[in-house]
Amino acid sequence: MKKLISVSEAGKLITPNASVMIGGFLRCGSPYRVIEEIIKNKTGGLTLIANDTSFEEYDRGKLIANKLVKKAIVTHIGTNPETGRQLNAGEIEVELVPMGTLVERIRCGGAGLGGFLTPTGKGTLVEEGKQVIESNGRKYLLEKPLRADFAIIYATKADKFGNAFLDGTTRNFNTVMATAADTVILEPEEISDTPLDPAQITIPGIFVDYIVMQEK
Amino acid sequence: MKKLISVSEAGKLITPNASVMIGGFLRCGSPYRVIEEIIKNKTGGLTLIANDTSFEEYDRGKLIANKLVKKAIVTHIGTNPETGRQLNAGEIEVELVPMGTLVERIRCGGAGLGGFLTPTGKGTLVEEGKQVIESNGRKYLLEKPLRADFAIIYATKADKFGNAFLDGTTRNFNTVMATAADTVILEPEEISDTPLDPAQITIPGIFVDYIVMQEK
Amino acid sequence: MELSKEQCREIIARRIAKEFSEGDVITLGIGLPTEVANYIPHDIHVIFQSENGMLGVGHRDLAAPENPKVTNAGGLPVTTKPGAVFFDTAMSFTIIRGGHVDATVLGALQVDQHGNLANWMIPGAFVPGMGGAMDLVVGAKKVIIAMEHTNKGKPRIVKNCTIPLTAEAEVDMIVTERCVLERTEQGLLLKEINPMFSLDDILRSTDADLIIPQELQQLAG
Amino acid sequence: MELSKEQCREIIARRIAKEFSEGDVITLGIGLPTEVANYIPHDIHVIFQSENGMLGVGHRDLAAPENPKVTNAGGLPVTTKPGAVFFDTAMSFTIIRGGHVDATVLGALQVDQHGNLANWMIPGAFVPGMGGAMDLVVGAKKVIIAMEHTNKGKPRIVKNCTIPLTAEAEVDMIVTERCVLERTEQGLLLKEINPMFSLDDILRSTDADLIIPQELQQLAG
């Protein structure tokens, strides 16, 4: 059985200056309850790893609006004008990564691999500072694995073993992030008293360290 | 809608000297009906890519017993004594690959990546002829992607879009192989008239070229 | 000849919608490319892929809850078509980069005669990020650019891109309100021309070298 | 002192079964390592991983059909424990190589004092293949070797492996019917000794340099 904790306990786990992966694609499949606690605790200096910085008034986008993020490693910041403003003002560092490369770097970090060769970004600014390796007559960029101190993961439904089912397009980055952080916090919408069907699990519970209890 | 074909038509698709990925882990999740046709047609000179050469009297193991395999790229041949006998007699070539590396090479081939860095095999015979690349202070082998002309894939249940559900431990190599061959033939136990639930699909139908009809 | 922005977009979207065959897997970029979906002939069944993690994207779902579980890459709620599949973003880019997408339609800032594409950043301006565009352009079997022919009169189809690239030599086709260009081994071929424009109009508003065939086809729409 | 093969195996399996903590994820190799599962204390809940693609492996399933859908890595039908999960082999090795397995128990042909392991081939003999062993040894947080102390009197614990390696410097612990050895920065530490054997018995049947502590603990069983 995994450790069931309150959202307030979950928020306290996150330490200042930590790197934090947060699942979600814009608002879809985005955890938000632990984020509210981080904001309440004013836990700052964070490195945010996510698909995007969402919107100013939602989920991880609020971390930006509350100036708790020192650096964002993302594919897109266009939907959150505050990220752009802080970037212009030199208040935040932003590393833009192609989406397929970002998700693969995280998978790589979770899968114990040392890197991968991708054709994406070849001949573009993304190539800068990277090793170019030829394989079977085609040139590829060597991209490195990405891991984090924490991952905050959304689930539609979880059981007490931490096994999680994610419906619709909520899976997005949640699945790979669950494998690539030292401490993984699952934020399910619903917790089932009975185990989920073994053939219908999106994220195996062994990746999960803590399950955030449902709101009363 | 995918092309529904008879098992006899499916067998005829496989050409002599082709490379063929066949799903399954020993007997579990192993397609066998198309294989019977390949044997009937005596389609030989094949390169078999699979987890193992199964057993002499079952599924892909029979391809070996019928001397239709020129080369096997597998992780294990111990359960099929005929593979060992042909190897000793110089009648077959066997490339042994660590399991995690084999499945990742196939995924890599299906995912348009040029290779990956793995710590597996470092300092062993598996290292021979491979580039060693240092990344974040650790040494890794550069492993290359693997693709095939054909993949023969097991499914527990499929719909007419080619979407497939694989129950229990039948998923094994079937999922990645479906992404990494020029022509993918799905051999489901059951074909559903209604579409499968979008959240419970193991292999998306877009990877599938042909669905083998059920036996009468 | 003056066309409104809406007219331009419709001409472009209608034309691109004719490029697809039964069963094609297609990923559309946001903005103008999204509109292509509205003009696909009813007898052709294509499968729309959404990079966040879905195949079989249907229409905008107007009955969706406030925080929907099924969205497109723009975050908007969508319906699912029969045969739809959900997966994670890693699988989504296995599909995209692995060559399992038959065609992608994307906008552009500049395209050059070598097939180079620039559509993600203008130096000095705010850069929202490349999202999945770099992977899409590299991975899709056919890359179709949907854009207005010029940027307020300034050519966008050029000899060599002058702003940072999204990908090298990956563009296969360019569709504007004025013409259809196809990239061939010899260079950019002028395939079709909108009869509202003269050949001279096209040449004056294009910086790239074009191959002009003997007989020009009329832009299909 | 003569122990039967069965007695040796039981001593080894019983001892290794004491190494685990509540919630540990464990992958057992085939053969002797599999027997460890029979001796896990009833108050400790561990999760067995099977490299073909399963977490929560239960017992041998004697009621399974001829061609079962739930098998272990040896192809034998097994039951599932509550909380079990099925996945593909790619995910299985994400788990294994990614360091998500707390411990693996494997057999060996030779282990040396540097933690090098040889368990997949003897030159000149038939080589069945490494299966998942190379990934397991590199990926698992703790690598425990379960083997009889000697091969018909010939030492298996040596200064330097003389047959091809499975992995370099990955072994953490060796459990035989005679003793328990732990790999430390200083070398192989003799942690526990089976009182049926003398220290001299151990030293004579071991080729590696051993660190002998002042007080030897008795092999737990």
Image (cartoon, coloured by chain):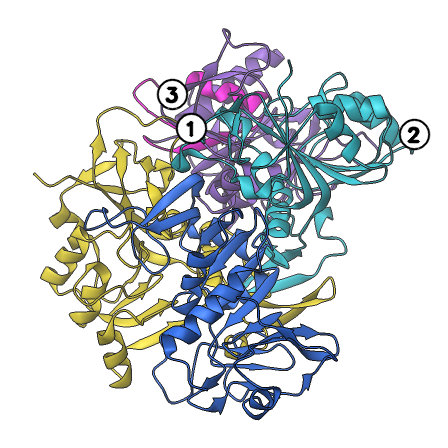
Chain colours: A cyan, B yellow, C purple, D blue
Check if mark 1 and mark 3 are on a common chain.
Answer: no
Q: Secondary structure at mark 3?
A: strand
Residue A89's disc is 2
Dot 2, how many residues are within 10 Å of its Cα: few (below 14), some (14-19), or many (20+)? few
**Which residues are drawn in magenta?**
C22-47
Residue C42: in magenta span: yes
State the residue in front, C111 or B194. Answer: B194
What residue does disc 3 label? C81
Label 1 sits on what residue type? Ala
What residue does disc 1 label? B199
Residue B213 in the figure: left or right of residue A3: left
**Looking at the image, is B58 positioned above or below residue C40?**
below
Label 2 sits on what residue type? Ala
In 3D space, how far apart are the residues under numbered discs 2 and 3 (Cα atoms)? Answer: 45 Å
Give the chain of mark 2. Answer: A
Q: Using the rendered image of the protein, determine whether residue C91 is visible from the camera's viewpoint.
A: yes
